[in-house]
Amino acid sequence: MNEKKFPLTKEETLRLIERYPTPFHLYDEAKIRANFRRLRETFAWAPSFREHFAVKALPNPRIVQLLHEDGAGTDCSSIPELIISAAAGVKGEEIMLTSNDTPYEEFQKAIELGAVINLDDLSHLDYMAKHAGLPNLLCFRYNPGNLVEGNDIIGKPVEAKYGLTREQMFEGYRRALEMGVKRFGVHTMVISAELRTEAFLLTARLMFELAAELKEKLGIHVEFVNLGGGFGIPYRPEQDGIDYDAVGAGIEKLYNEIMRPAGRGDVGIRTESARGITGDAGWLVSTVLHEKDTYKKYIGLDSCMANLMRPAIYGAYHHITILGKENEPADHVYDVTGSLCENNDKFAIDRALPKIDIGDILIIHDTGAHGSAMGFNYNAKLHCAELLRRMDGSIELIRRPQTIDDYFATLKYEGSLMK
Ligand SMILES: *Cc1c(COP(=O)(O)O)cnc(C)c1O
């Protein structure tokens, strides 16, 4: 069980809406920092630990900056994400580039910033060396194939486009050594939105065994094992969150069993959690515009899939509450929709909720990761604002809403679109 709470009272929310009209995402700094602290404590036993926040989940320099103040670096998959990291004060090896199908400009920018490079394929080694040179610290992304089950979001590893096979991993490190790379790490990301302790332990075991074997076969002493992201959050109120104490203790035990006897007791642990840090610290706040009663009952919001796509593309559950009606019985059943001309633009299908009235404020929970960031401009729908609730309760606008001018900015058109 977990309680789905919105950090503002009804009065505070209504006052905020006068200043910033809906829809908007609100993020809570205190919750983000607390989530990060919990992750750090999980790995407090490791010789060195660093979290590289996966910028793609919430690409906002303010968020990256506040996490960096507490010691987090970043994991990037594009030039703008590298620029966001640098703008937020994240430097050198605090930054990691984990892209796939990577254009050489990304390698160039990452090497210029002194970032750690994580290669997604054997062939990228020569490609990077030719176009961008070599980084000081290199790792390869491991895809363990049939050893791991996968799920709907990340897919089965054997079907996934990411990473190298086990044989290719050894070939990659061998060739990188020959090319003169001196410092190495090892990386994987095979789980997503995972809540089960065993899944984290399986990942850690695979990676520790790989690191030990790299030492044995190639004499490579990796500086870190990066376990990737995939730390899930309980999207449904009846779910329990990750047992971080059990994950920490379980991984420590494996480390002591596998790494220490192999003379690898100094290897650091890295993670790239995003959902686990900001996921449950964000809410999409919308106003009910319409109620429609046909073959089903529909509630139409002023937000849409442009602001939160996860329900539409993965059928993901996001909890919904209605401001001021949190304790009323859920005795009505609705489809909660956005305004896109796509029938999958629904935040919830057949959801039991209290009676909803036009003008009600709907809170969609757990939108802090892969929420706003995933939004697109299909149907010429615009991105909404993002607000940060600071530790002292004040509210900061950290992304203004996209305007029609912004949307038209890339069009070439003789005359004026803005009459
Ligand atoms: C998306 C991504 C992450 C973050 O995933 P979460 O499930 O949000 O923790 C981390 N690493 C890589 C390589 C990713 O692509």
Image (cartoon, rainbow, N blue to C red):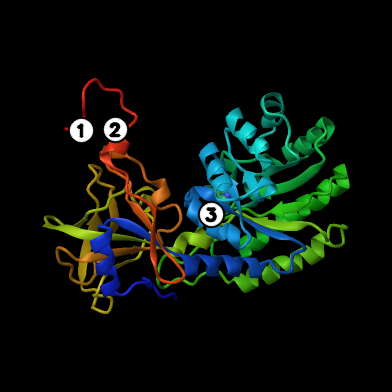
Q: Which residue is mark 2?
A: 408
Q: Nearer the viewer, mark 1 or mark 2?
A: 1
Q: Quadrant of residue 204?
A: bottom right
Tag 1 near tag 2, CB within 8 Å: yes
Please give the name of the residue rendered at 22% of the width and 72% of the height, measured from the top-left corner.
354
Residue count near mark 1 (Cα–Cα under 10 Å), binned few <14, some 14–19, many ≥20: few
Question: Which one is nearer the viewer's eye here, 174 or 386?
Answer: 386
**Residue 314 seen in render:** no
Vertical comparison of 195 with 219: above or below: below
**In terms of secondary structure, where does tag 1 sit?**
loop
x and y percentages locating residue 193 in the rendered image? 51, 58
Question: Which one is nearer the viewer's eye here, 35 or 9?
Answer: 9
Q: Which residue is mark 3?
A: 64
Q: Which residue is mark 1?
A: 418
Q: From mark 1 to mark 3, how far is it between C-alphas?
A: 35 Å
Residue count near mark 2 (Cα–Cα under 10 Å), binned few <14, some 14–19, many ≥20: few
x and y percentages locating residue 131 in the rendered image? 67, 25
**In terms of secondary structure, where does tag 3 sit?**
helix
Question: Which one is nearer the viewer's eye here, 244 or 135?
Answer: 135
Amino acid type, label 1: Met
Q: Quadrant of residue 165?
A: top right
Q: Earlier in the sequence, mark 1 or mark 2?
A: 2
**Residue 419 seen in render:** yes
Amino acid type, label 2: Phe
Q: From mark 1 to mark 2, how far is it between C-alphas?
A: 9 Å
